[in-house]
Image: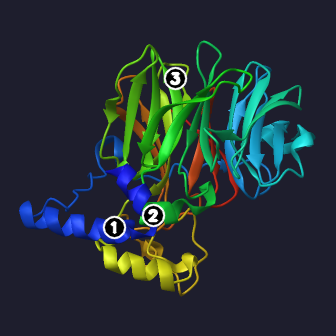
Amino acid sequence: MDRLRVVLGKGALMFDALLSRLKEALWPGSEAIALPTMNGALKPNRRLDEATPLGDVLPGCDDLIELQDGSLIVSAGHRLWQLSGAAYAQRTPWADECAGLLGPLGALTAAGDTVYAALTSGSVLRLERGRITARLESLDGSALRGVTALAVLPDGRVAIAEGSATNPPADWARDLLERRAEGRIVIANADLSAASVLLRDLAWPAGLHVQDDALWFSEAWRHRVQAIPLAGGAPRPVLQNLPGYPGRFAPDAAGDVWLAVFALRTQLLEFVLREHAYRAEMLAAIDPRYWIAPALGTAGHYLEPLQGGAIKKLGIVKPWAPPRSYGLVLRLSAQGEILDSLHSRAGGVHHGITAVRRRGDALIALSKGSGRVLQAKLP
């Protein structure tokens, strides 16, 4: 079905509309989606807003890794920054050879002191001692469109998540509203040679993580985490019907897994995703800044679709206010159970969490919405 949408191209929206009406006629209520309740381990809190910002604002911060020597590397704009000093406030350009390359840098991963970095324009770079030693730009005769996540497998090979064959990472909201499922997971040798497709027709794969004998991957538009055995076999569900759009993972020394959720689902957006004619008109006629769509942050402009933070009672933002942007990090068990969560609610500022990393008794998180590197204390 997803391949048929790719063939139809722009006609996919009309096809979706016809398919939706047919399903609703045959199975009334089948298009309705029940959002999970935010309670228990998901109960909203202010732990991300109470986190300590580290250093100055870092516009465009996207991903975060830790090198063998314990230093932190952050991708932001056209540079990789090394964070050091007291409270990681000192920023030093790392691998400055990358500066000036076309397109900003995004996804990162590392094996020892070898770093793999993705340009949001599509390429994947292998960096050794800060120097580019290999580059992957295309597969099967077509250029990589937009890499969202990277991971190194136990045998040294590299797993690459490509969110969409049409939209680059910056256009993730368009990809969601177009209801595309063109993503794939690619496996390449350590030197980025012999690349091949492991999985295709995924709805924006945005995170990769090796857990035991399987490769976990998040599928944002389907609100789930799946695992595919490294020895071969079909994917199996790990976590389904998440309250938001899952992104990148990070390991925990205790054997758990941290998951960054870069935006939250809402009833309004689920309704818009089912209204195909409305979506097509909105995409064609409205400035993308003002679409009814999730965002990584809010500018507070009066033309923005209603942000829950605009609704207050006696000057207090209600915890149930439906936000356009949100900050959310989940702690998962090795079996995929949600154990804990950190939030920045509708009235908060640290939204759009795109990467996390456990450091001792603290969690380092990147808020792309506020451009902040955060340190949250963990119990």
| Relative image position of residue 313 (x, y in whole percent) | 38, 79
Q: Which mark is residue 88?
A: none
Label 3 crowd (10 A; few <14 / some 14-19 / many >=20): many
Q: Is residue 371 visible?
A: yes
Label 2 crowd (10 A; few <14 / some 14-19 / many >=20): few
Marks 3 and 2 in Cβ contact (< 8 Å): no
| Relative image position of residue 202 (x, y in whole percent) | 43, 44
Secondary structure beneath label 1: helix
Going by the numbered disc 1, the residue's amino acid type is Leu
Label 1 crowd (10 A; few <14 / some 14-19 / many >=20): some
Q: Earlier in the sequence, mark 3 or mark 1?
A: 3
Q: Nearer the viewer, residue 336 or 97?
A: 97
Going by the numbered disc 3, the residue's amino acid type is Val
Residue position marked by numbered label 3 in the rendering = 210
Secondary structure beneath label 2: helix
| Relative image position of residue 107 (x, y in whole percent) | 66, 41
* Residue sitting at x 40%, y 62%: 8
Marks 3 and 1 in Cβ contact (< 8 Å): no
Secondary structure beneath label 3: strand
Q: Earlier in the sequence, mark 2 or mark 1?
A: 2
Residue position marked by numbered label 1 in the rendering = 273
Q: Is residue 333 visible?
A: no
* Residue sitting at x 64%, y 48%: 366
Which quadrant holds residue 321?
bottom left
Q: Kindly report the distance in space between the C-alpha atoms of the residues bearing marks 3 and 2.
A: 34 Å
Q: Nearer the viewer, residue 311 or 103?
A: 103
Residue position marked by numbered label 2 in the rendering = 9
Going by the numbered disc 2, the residue's amino acid type is Gly
* Residue sitting at x 52%, y 23%: 210
- The answer to whether 214 appears left or right of 27 in the picture is right
Q: Kindly report the distance in space between the C-alpha atoms of the residues bearing marks 2 and 1.
A: 17 Å
Mark 2 vs mark 1, foreground winner is 2
